[in-house]
Amino acid sequence: MLCKNIISLYQNKGIPLADIKTVFDGYFHISFDEGFFSDKDIPDSFVLETLDKLLSGYPANYLAGYIDVQGLHLFLNEDTLIPRNETIAFVFDFIKNQYPLHQKKVLDLCTGSGLIALGVKKLFPDAMVYGSDISLSALEMAKKSAKYNHLDVTFLQSDYLNDIQDTFDVILSNPPYIPVNAEGVNAPFEPDIALYSGEDGLDSYRSIFSKLDSHLNKDGFAMFEMDARNCYDVTYSKEGLLSQYKNVFSGEAFKDIYGRYRYLKLSKR
Ligand SMILES: C[S@@+](CC[C@H](N)C(=O)[O-])C[C@H]1O[C@@H](n2cnc3c(N)ncnc32)[C@H](O)[C@@H]1O
């Protein structure tokens, strides 16, 4: 099938143009812009098989094996969460503007594709940046992306903070935080381990908070992405997760680009 016919077919079937572009550039290896004029032919069976995958909801970025984010080329496989807008804004807007990390020693805990770690290193080249995750397969992608983007970031495997001995000025983390039985979660192709964390979605924070104090340097702080349903309560409620740490940390909740409380900052007292 001719490229221009594939583009119309996919559009007529409701595939968003951005996904068609991703598939052309990253999976068919034909520049989308050239696609309209190209006389290249792709076998019908391959075109239709790809269409079926896209119609089933399989992410175009998994087919392509990458996503381009704010000038970063991030490699992806099925063990890496596809970066979300809130997290991209967390790094490239919130952290960039509110918390410049020059010369800080920074850990991106639960790094996945390496988005936060690589974003911080790109924004603040004089920061010493580390990224950790339990998934070796995700870490492989993050390392490959670091090399490709010429960013000097050290990646290590750890179950949350349990296998890390080092201390940091700043710990940033977007851990899994969806309750296991939550309804309306639409991410069937992404790894469960990146999404779900116990009955209330807070198991990841329980584990991390219990080890946080000993991994933060004096005057250090940590920032977490959190489910909008939990963030305010965890931060401020008297019975919330933070209540047992009130002598150790002060907590503050911040809103994301959509105006929902989504980021928790814990500062060492
Ligand atoms: C929500 S994803 C975040 C990925 C990336 N930081 C981002 O924001 O796009 C959570 C990550 O936590 C990792 N993870 C899950 N359980 C973990 C554990 N016990 N210890 C360390 N990392 C874990 C997953 O492999 C996944 O990469």
Image (spheres, rainbow, N blue to C red):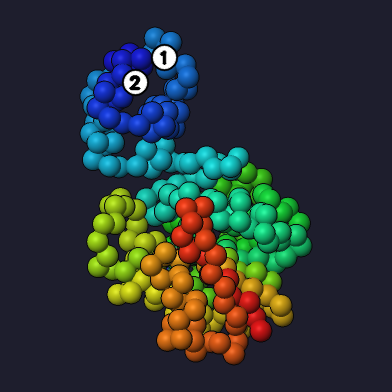
At label 1, the amino acid type is Phe
Image coords of residue 88 (percent x, y): 53, 50
- Residue, x 31% and y 52% (percent of image)? 187
Image coords of residue 194 (percent x, y): 39, 61
Viewer-proximal residue, 181 or 160? Answer: 181
Viewer-proximal residue, 104 or 201? Answer: 201
Instruction: Pick the quarter of the image with the C terminus.
Output: bottom right
Vertical arrangement, residue 186 with respect to residue 106, above or below: above
Vertical arrangement, residue 36 with respect to residue 23, above or below: above
First reached walking from the N terminus: tag 2 or tag 1: 2
Give the Cα distance between marks 2 and 1: 8 Å
Determine crowd level at label 1: few under 14, some 14-19, many 20+ residues with C-alpha closer than 10 A.
Answer: some
The residue that label 2 is drawn on is 7
Secondary element type, mark 1 = loop
Instruction: Report which quarter residue 222 is drawn in.
Output: bottom right
Labelled disc at residue 36: 1
